């Protein structure tokens, strides 16, 4: 499925139907009185969270959404039929802004959440409504109220429990494949992943959502690579899982590049709980591995694991640690003491 995380659309609610001007006309009944019904209400415009949607791509093909108008009232006191409402189906995580792209109208954060964006116009009163003791034959019937219309922006910011970050080719998608049923593309070249992908990870009696994001490179926050366009998707992840490629000569440097990009984009991103997974452990000797882990523990305050996403070695420890952190709503901060055994080798 193609991915699109921003769209501009036009919405309009229905106009109310006009009230009817009519009088009873029946044989042998003189002065039958007014019987014009009210107009029907115009349809509303709703937005609703849809299951199984994780892109706004549908809005590339259709940008205009109009609810139908209410029908006119009719004689014999018949009220017009209300106009049909329209419902925009959007993925959870969609924020809806006014045309200025700044004023938030609603943030769709939960499954099944539904919100009325525009209200349809009320129907006009028919002449029966204006009947009084002193005016038994009113010749007044109102026209319906117009609906509302405007342009709005939809912006999708993925909501996941854990976001996968790291340089291109580090093994993020391989990790997602290893721990979930998601099947993101894996290949030995940078920028294989072009769009965020979600996977559901089961752990013990629970589950959490893991988001695979495109790789970050130096100066991503300035728009290099695919970087900053997707950095916004990390904003609503509770925890970050930082995958570091042990195939690189200086893994700590790779780690710092990504941390720096997070900080430059939004300093609060760098404050999120983080777990570090040193991937491709089989490429290093046991000695080198111990040294690298010690170095990471010294320089960071995060839990550090050495894993092989491709063989699945030690990935469950990472999953369990992520899960435990999410349940506590905070990730354990590992001791800076290099002896602390947070890592299975
Ligand atoms: N030796 C080894 N190779 C791995 C391991 N995990 C991933 N790879 C390889 O690393 C390459 C990149 O893997 P991906 O999962 O596509 O990396 P990515 O981080 O998603 O890359 P982008 O989507 O481009 O950012 C692939 O050729 C994988 O087979 C591992 O544990 N050991
Ligand atoms: Mg990938």
Image (spheres, grey):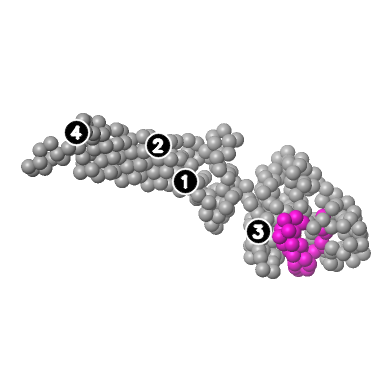
Marks 1 and 4, how far apart at CA: 41 Å
Which residue is the site of mark 3?
A: 209
Which residue is the site of mark 2?
A: 147
Which residue is the site of mark 4?
A: 136
Report whether 303 appears left or right of 190: right
Residue stretch rendered in magenta on the structure:
302-331
Which circle's residue, 1 or 2, is located before the other in the chain? 1
The reply to whether callout 1 and callout 4 are in contact (CB within 8 Å) is no
Question: Is disc 4 placed on a helix, strand or loop?
Answer: loop
Which circle's residue, 1 or 3, is located before the other in the chain? 1
Which circle's residue, 3 or 2, is located before the other in the chain? 2
Question: Is disc 3 placed on a helix, strand or loop?
Answer: strand
Marks 1 and 3, how far apart at CA: 27 Å
Give the residue drawn at x 38%, y 38%.
Answer: 121
Which image quarter: residue 133? top left
The reply to whether callout 2 and callout 4 are in contact (CB within 8 Å) is no
Marks 1 and 2, how far apart at CA: 14 Å
Q: Mark 3, residues whose alpha carbon is within 10 Å: few (<14), some, or many (≥20)?
A: some
Q: How many marks?
A: 4
The reply to whether callout 1 and callout 2 are in contact (CB within 8 Å) is no
Give the residue drawn at x 67%, y 68%.
Answer: 205
In reply to whether residue 305 is colored magenta, the answer given is yes
Which residue is the site of mark 1?
A: 46
């Amino acid at each position: 499925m193609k991915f699109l995380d921003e769209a501009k659309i036009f919405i309009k609610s229905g106009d109310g139907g006009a009230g009817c001007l009519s009088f009873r006309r029946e044989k042998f009944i003189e002065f039958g009185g007014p019987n014009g019904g009210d107009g029907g209400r115009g349809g509303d415009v709703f937005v609703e969270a849809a299951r199984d949607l994780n892109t706004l791509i549908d809005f590339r093909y259709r940008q205009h959404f109009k609810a139908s108008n209410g029908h006119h009232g009719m004689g014999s006191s018949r009220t017009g039929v209300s106009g049909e409402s329209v419902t925009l189906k959007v993925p959870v995580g969609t924020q809806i802004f006014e045309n200025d792209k700044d004023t938030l109208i609603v943030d769709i954060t939960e499954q099944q959440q539904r919100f009325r964006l525009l209200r349809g116009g009320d129907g006009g009163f028919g002449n029966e409504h204006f009947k009084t003791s002193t005016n038994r034959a009113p010749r007044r019937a109102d026209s319906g109220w117009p609906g509302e219309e405007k342009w709005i922006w939809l912006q999708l910011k993925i909501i996941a429990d854990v976001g996968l970050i790291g340089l291109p080719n580090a093994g993020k998608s391989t990790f997602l494949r290893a721990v979930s049923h998601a099947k993101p593309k894996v290949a030995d070249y940078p920028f294989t992943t072009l769009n965020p992908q979600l996977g559901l990870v089961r752990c013990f009696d629970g589950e959490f959502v893991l988001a695979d994001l495109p790789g970050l490179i130096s100066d991503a926050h300035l728009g290099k690579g695919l970087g900053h366009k997707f950095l916004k998707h990390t904003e609503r992840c509770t925890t970050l899982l930082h995958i570091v490629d042990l195939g690189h000569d200086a893994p700590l440097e790779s780690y710092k590049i990504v941390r720096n990009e997070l900080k430059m984009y939004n300093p609060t991103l760098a404050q999120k709980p983080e777990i570090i997974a040193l991937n491709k452990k089989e490429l290093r000797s046991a000695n080198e591995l111990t040294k690298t882990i010690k170095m990471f523990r010294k320089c960071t305050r995060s839990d550090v694991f050495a894993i092989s996403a491709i063989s699945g070695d030690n990935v469950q420890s990472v999953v369990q640690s992520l899960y435990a952190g999410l349940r506590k709503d905070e990730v354990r901060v590992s001791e800076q003491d290099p002896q602390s055994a947070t890592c299975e080798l």
